[in-house]
Image (cartoon, grey):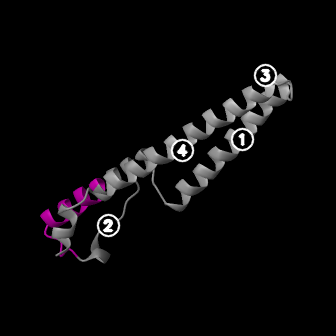
Amino acid sequence: MADEQRKGRGSVGDEVREGIRAGLGILSALKDAVEETVQDMLDRGELSPERAREAVRSTMDRAQSTFEEARGRLDFVTRREYEALESEVAELRRRVDGYHGQGGTGAAGDIPITES
């Protein structure tokens, strides 16, 4: 039944990518809205150029910080972290396979641990 449910929708990775795209779209729309509002205020003389730049920078910094916090709560790993773990697993598999090929019993406590 779980397989049937998965067929009707995209993979989790696709859903995550769509969520990230949506988040980036929201940030882009926010940036555009802030810039337009600030430009309107500049045109009416209600804001100095220096304060306008600082307001845009501050708003975008807060938005980016919020986005980073959300990403952290989703507990993503970076590609670099994933590849490092993938390499470690491959090395452990190689070592276990080599141990079994030497007549080892395969018990986890019997595998010699050496520094790489």
Answer yes or no: is residue 116 visible.
Answer: no
Q: Which residue is mark 2?
A: 112
- Sequence-wise, the earlier of marks 2 and 4 is 4
Q: CA distance from mark 2 to mark 4?
A: 52 Å
Residue 7, position as x, y percentages in the image: 17, 62
Task: Write down the region rendered in magenta.
Answer: 90-106
Q: Residues within 10 Å of mark 3 (few under 14, many from 20)?
A: few
Q: Residues within 10 Å of mark 4 (few under 14, many from 20)?
A: few
Q: Quadrant for residue 34, please give it.
A: top right
Main SS of the magenta part reads helix
Q: Which residue is mark 1?
A: 59
- Sequence-wise, the earlier of marks 2 and 3 is 3
The numbered mark at residue 43 is: 3
- Sequence-wise, the earlier of marks 3 and 4 is 4
Q: CA distance from mark 2 to mark 1?
A: 55 Å
- Say which of 9 and 3 sits in front: 9
Q: Are marks 3 and 1 in contact (CB under 8 Å)?
A: no
Q: Kindly identify the residue that appears in the image at 32 percent across and 51 percent down.
A: 14
Label 4 sits on what residue type? Answer: Ile
Q: Which residue is mark 4?
A: 26
Q: CA distance from mark 3 to mark 1?
A: 20 Å
- Say which of 53 and 104 sits in front: 53
Residue 109, position as x, y percentages in the image: 31, 77
Label 3 sits on what residue type? Answer: Asp
Which dot, 3 or 1, sits closer to the camera?
3
Label 1 sits on what residue type? Answer: Thr
* Local SS, label 3: helix
